[in-house]
Image (cartoon, rainbow, N blue to C red):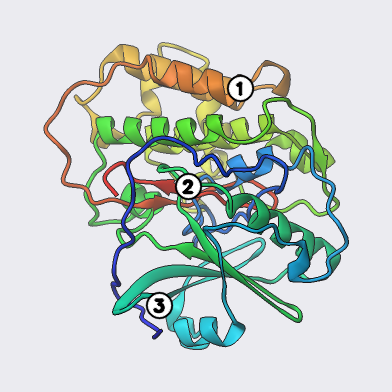
Amino acid sequence: MGNCFGSCSKINDNEDDNVDSSVNSKPFSRADSDTGRSSNLSYPWSLKPLIARKCEANITLPAPRGEGDIMHSQYLKSFTLDELKNATGNFCPESLIGEGGFGFVHKGCVNGGPGIELSVAVKKLKTGGLQGHKEWLREVNYLGRLHHPNLVKLIGYSLENEHRLLVYEHMPNGSLENHLFERGSNVLSWSLRMKVAIGAARGLSKEGPKDNRSHVTTEVMGTEGYAAPEYLATGHLTTKCDVYSFGVVLLEILSGRRVIDKSKAREEESLVEWATPYLRDKRKVFRIMDTKLVGQYPKKAAFMMSFLALQCIGEVKVRPSMIEVLSLLEKVPIPRHRKSRSKGFAYTNSASMSSKRFLRHPKD
């Protein structure tokens, strides 16, 4: 196993849309919501908070005792701290690809078999004590049993003394943030943006409890701009918080704007605050649409997507469920265009307290 900060062998993925039968709804909470170095998104996380959070509702965690609390999963490998230090160049600055409320994310390579190196994203948690262990344990126990083609995989973990790390599949073609916001990147077409939204909603709607019971945390964490107002105010984390986060992501996809952009005028810094008045007025909806998408979408599609985003970020009592969100997304007309040349990516966004789900590009 060696460290590598360039490109490594890509993990082969199955396009099957089914969740592995070994997924256990009993175990976890959510994964950490790691964000990229910008103040907005995160890197290898994909709607991180969303799915993980769904499973916090029913969880009663034992006091941390070590690996004995970790539920067995055929998909997870236990790494030593030395192995991950070697994989990331001792967590050197050159390997750092993301930082969020719960830790730092480093790129590295691990042994994937004879002659095979796997490119991974190693999340090193910075939250200590009982609370930090609980969040880490929830992520390991839930994501370790989750197997879905639209979500980036948790490959393994490391638990040594106070050190708690998570090892994720690394998507070599960058993040949604890269493709939406970075100069020089290929423009994501309307049809590809729709595929991303539908793929994420499909993964989120299939995982976790279907009720809306809340999990209470004493430590509110998450990526700025994505957390639901009621979560920030009370610490109560529910599936409706996930819906809010997803609505924010929809706004980013529609507008091509960051969730928080300090370069904008003060009244336009927050994407949600800036866009909401336009979403409520059908005559002004097109003011929020990404100008790079002109001519690519039917007006009806813009209206439907804007209305759905408004519902998702609205009052908690009237927010749809993720199943309802998926149903509405699948009804949005997608014009047929030639295939985009844009490369695959993993999304990293989240507003969750401890987890960060990863969104897989449809082509990966």
Give the distance between the C-alpha atoms of the residues marked 3 and 2, in whole angstroms.
Answer: 44 Å
Q: Nearer the viewer, residue 297 or 44?
A: 44
Q: Earlier in the sequence, mark 1 or mark 2?
A: 2
Q: Secondary structure at mark 2?
A: loop
Q: Secondary structure at mark 3?
A: strand
Q: Quadrant of residue 334?
A: top left
Pinpoint residue 88: horizontal percent, then vertical percent.
47, 82
Q: Which residue is mark 3?
A: 111
How would you rate the neighbour count of disc 2 (Cα within 10 Å): few for under 14, some for 14-19, many for 20 or more? few
Give the distance between the C-alpha atoms of the residues marked 1 and 2, in whole angstroms.
Answer: 32 Å
Rendered position, 124 above or below 238 = below
Identity, as a three-letter code, of the amino acid under mark 2: Lys
Q: Earlier in the sequence, mark 3 or mark 1?
A: 3
Q: Which residue is mark 2?
A: 264
Closer to the camera: disc 3 or disc 2?
Answer: 3
Pinpoint residue 190: horizontal percent, then vertical percent.
27, 31
Mark 3 vs 1: CB contact within 8 A: no
